[in-house]
C-alpha cells in the first residue's frame, strides 16, 4: 500500500515539474544518457598505444662441428663445457659426438653434466651418476643394460654429429712386473751345455815330465 502511494506521489511530482508522463520522463533520461556517452566518446583522447613487445635478442648461431679425429681421454676432458668457447663433446662406446646444441642438458648445471667430456658408456647403460661408473668399460653388464646403451647410441647417432674417436690406451707394466717377466723368461729358456774342461791331472803329469827332463840335463852337465 505504501509503495502504491509513493508511486502516485512520484507521478504527480514528475508531471508537476516537467509536464511529462512518467514513461516519457524516463525515456528522455535514457536518450540523454546515450547521447552523453556518444558525445563524450567523440571528444575523448585516443587510447594509449599498446606496449611494444619486448625484443628477445637472437641467439648466436652455433659454429659447425669440428672434426677432432682420434683423441685421448685426457684431451676429451677439455671439452666438458667449462670453456664456452670450446665445443661440448661426449663419447659413447669410443665414438665422440658434438652435443653443443644440448648445452642445457650436458653443459655446466645441466642434469647430465657429469657425462660431458667423458666416455660414460657404463654410466649411461646403468643410468648411474656414481663416479666409478663414469668409464668406457662395459664389461660385466647385463643384456638389459646393453640394450639401454644401444638405445643411447642410436639417439646420439640420429641427433648429433660424430666428430672423432677415443684413442685406446694400452696399460704399461711397471718395472717390477717387467723384471719378473724377464726372470721367468730366463728360467724357462733352455740352458746351453757347459764346455768340458780338460782334466787337471793331465796338466800335472806334463809338468812332472818336464821337471824330470830338466834334472837329467843337469846331471849330464
Image (cartoon, rainbow, N blue to C red):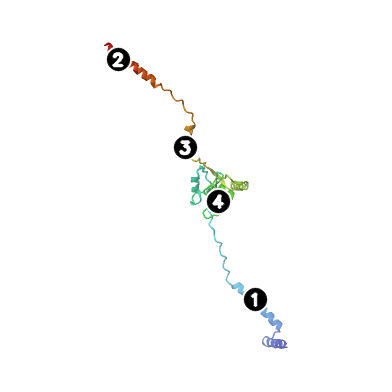
- Disc marking residue 35: 1
Q: In the image, what residue occupies the spot 30% across and 13% down?
A: 216
Name the residue that disc number 4 marks.
101
Q: Earlier in the sequence, mark 3 or mark 2?
A: 3
- Give neighbour class at mark 1: few <14, some 14-19, many 20+ (Cα, 10 Å): few
Q: Is residue 157 left or right of residue 13?
A: left
Q: Earlier in the sequence, mark 1 or mark 3?
A: 1
Which image quarter holds the N terminus?
bottom right
Q: Nearer the viewer, mark 3 or mark 4?
A: 3
Q: Earlier in the sequence, mark 1 or mark 2?
A: 1
Q: Secondary structure at mark 3?
A: helix
The residue positioned farthest toward the front in the image shown: 219
Name the residue that disc number 2 marks.
215
- Disc marking residue 71: none
Q: Nearer the viewer, residue 74 or 57?
A: 74
Q: Is residue 32 above or below residue 60?
A: below
Q: Secondary structure at mark 2?
A: helix
- Callout 3 touching callout 4 (CB < 8 Å): no
Which image quarter holds the C terminus?
top left
Q: In the image, what residue occupies the spot 66% across and 80% down?
A: 29
Q: Is residue 123 above or below residue 7?
A: above
Q: CA distance from mark 1 to mark 2?
A: 172 Å
Q: In the image, what residue occupies the spot 57% across and 49% down?
A: 124
Q: CA distance from mark 4 to mark 1?
A: 63 Å
Name the residue that disc number 3 marks.
180
- Give neighbour class at mark 3: few <14, some 14-19, many 20+ (Cα, 10 Å): few
Residue 102 at x, y percent in the picture = 56, 52
Amino acid at each position: 500500500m505504501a509503495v502504491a502511494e509513493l508511486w502516485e506521489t512520484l507521478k504527480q511530482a514528475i508531471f508537476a515539474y516537467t509536464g511529462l508522463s512518467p514513461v516519457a520522463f524516463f525515456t528522455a533520461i535514457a536518450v540523454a544518457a546515450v547521447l552523453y556517452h556518444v558525445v563524450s566518446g567523440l571528444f575523448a583522447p585516443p587510447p594509449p598505444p599498446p606496449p611494444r613487445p619486448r625484443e628477445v635478442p637472437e641467439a648466436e648461431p652455433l659454429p659447425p662441428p669440428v672434426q677432432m679425429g682420434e683423441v685421448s681421454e685426457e684431451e676429451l676432458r677439455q671439452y666438458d663445457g667449462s670453456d664456452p668457447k670450446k665445443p661440448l663433446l661426449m663419447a659413447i662406446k669410443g665414438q665422440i659426438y658434438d652435443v653443443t646444441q644440448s648445452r642445457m642438458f650436458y653443459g655446466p648445471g645441466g642434469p647430465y653434466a657429469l657425462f660431458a667430456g667423458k666416455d660414460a658408456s657404463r654410466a649411461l647403460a646403468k643410468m648411474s651418476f656414481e663416479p666409478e661408473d663414469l668409464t668406457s668399460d662395459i664389461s660385466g653388464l647385463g643384456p638389459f643394460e646393453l640394450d639401454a646403451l644401444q638405445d643411447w647410441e642410436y639417439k646420439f647417432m640420429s641427433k648429433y654429429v660424430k666428430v672423432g674417436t677415443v684413442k685406446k690406451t694400452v696399460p704399461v707394466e711397471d718395472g717390477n712386473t717387467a723384471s719378473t717377466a724377464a726372470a721367468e723368461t730366463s728360467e724357462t729358456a733352455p740352458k746351453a751345455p757347459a764346455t768340458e774342461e780338460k782334466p787337471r791331472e793331465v796338466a800335472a803329469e806334463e809338468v812332472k815330465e818336464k821337471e824330470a827332463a830338466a834334472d837329467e840335463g843337469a846331471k849330464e852337465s
